Amino acid sequence: MRNLILMAFLSTISLLNAKAQNQKTMVKQIKETVTFIESAAANRDVKQLAELLHEDYRVVANRFKGSKTATVLSKEVYLEMMKNEKVGGTTYDIQYNDIKITGHTAIVDLLYRSDTTSDMHKYLILIQDEDNQWKVVSDIPIIME
């Protein structure tokens, strides 16, 4: 009986350790994805962005830069704006405030800091695709003025 209890205890510890390691791996992958997206946006690399953003990607800009309404941009519109140099082109330092992961979905709370423009608070929602690659499906930017 003692052996059975010991085995159960060790199995539980092992399972919790594996789950923690998986969580650490996911956090690392999410941070890499966010870094790649920030770099691609700074360089206006539309091709790389197209690969990193989910096909249903949306920017939801609520009262952005003094607007009184919310603006929702599709992936196609966002990439076209990037191509036309209406967005992007700024390099930011990224500060991760929080990363919450549930299953194959993550919510990332970020602060983008820049010496050349206003800082931006962002909420990103990422999902893992069928190949377990993290893709941004929603981007909610808030300009810090």
Image: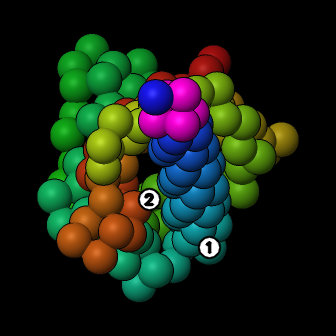
Tell me where residue 100 appears, x and y as whole percent.
46, 31
Seen at 16% across and 58% down, the residue is 56
Residue 72 lies within the magenta run: no
96 vs 104, nearest the viewer? 104
Alpha carbons under labels 1 and 2: distance apart: 13 Å
- Residue 84 in sight: no
The stretch of residues the image draws in magenta is: 2-6
Mark closest to the chain's N terminus, 1 or 2? 1
Tell me where residue 121 appears, x and y as whole percent.
56, 28
In the image, which disc is placed on residue 43?
1
Residue farthest to the right, as pictured? 115
**Picture mark count:** 2
Looking at the rendered image, the quarter that the C terminus falls into is: top right
Tell me where residue 47 appears, x and y as whole percent.
41, 84
25 vs 136, nearest the viewer? 25
Residue 86 sits in which quadrant?
bottom left
Dot 1, how many residues are within 10 Å of its Cα: few (below 14), some (14-19), or many (20+)? some
Tell me where residue 125 appears, x and y as whole percent.
35, 41
Dot 2, how many residues are within 10 Å of its Cα: few (below 14), some (14-19), or many (20+)? few
Above or below, 46 relative to 109: below
In the image, which disc is placed on residue 86?
2
Seen at 54% across and 28% down, the residue is 2
Seen at 64% across and 26% down, the residue is 97
Specify whether 56 is left or right of 28.
left
SS state under label 2: loop
In the image, which disc is placed on residue 66?
none
34 vs 63, nearest the viewer? 34
- Residue 6 in sight: yes
Residue farthest to the bottom, as pictured? 47
Seen at 30% across and 43% down, the residue is 103
Residue 96 sits in which quadrant?
top right
